[in-house]
Image (cartoon, rainbow, N blue to C red):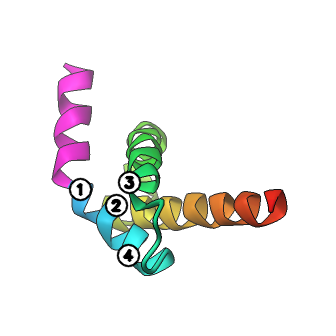
Amino acid sequence: AYFALRDRIVLGNRKLIYRAVRRRMAESNRSDDLVGDCQIVLIQAVASFNPWIGIRFSTYAFTCLLRALSRQAQRAASNG
């Protein structure tokens, strides 16, 4: 039951992924790779979300996505 509910939440919020990738990486040739990585981040966000802290899931997930994209950009810049 948990996995079915998690999948519904992920599918319902997948637009956040595309919005974050567009906002963070304009015209990137790696956008398909980033979308795949962000799918994993969104699944992790569902698992770690605490509804009792008083923020919406979409706000929490979008912040997680932007942080993950920022870390990936830093890794790519340091690797050259």
**Mark sitting earlier along the chain (1/4):** 1
Q: Residues within 10 Å of mark 1 (few under 14, many from 20)?
A: some
Task: Please provide percent x and percent y for residue 35.
Answer: 38, 53
Q: Is residue 79 above or below residue 39?
A: below
Depth check, mark 3 against mark 1: the one in front is: 3
Depth check, mark 2 against mark 4: the one in front is: 4
Question: Between marks 1 and 2, how big is the CA–CA gap?
Answer: 8 Å
Q: Amino acid at mark 3?
A: Asp
Q: Secondary structure at mark 2?
A: helix
| Residue stretch rendered in magenta on the structure | 1-12
Residue position marked by numbered label 3 in the rendering? 32
Question: Between marks 2 and 4, how big is the CA–CA gap?
Answer: 9 Å
Instruction: Specify the label residue 22 is tagged with.
Output: 4
Residue at 81% across, 56% down = 79
Q: Residues within 10 Å of mark 2 (few under 14, many from 20)?
A: many
Question: Between marks 3 and 2, how big is the CA–CA gap?
Answer: 11 Å
Residue position marked by numbered label 2 in the rendering? 17
Task: Please provide percent x and percent y for residue 27.
Answer: 42, 78
Instruction: Specify the label residue 13 is tagged with.
Output: 1
Quadrant of residue 22 within the rendered picture: bottom left
Depth check, mark 1 against mark 4: the one in front is: 4
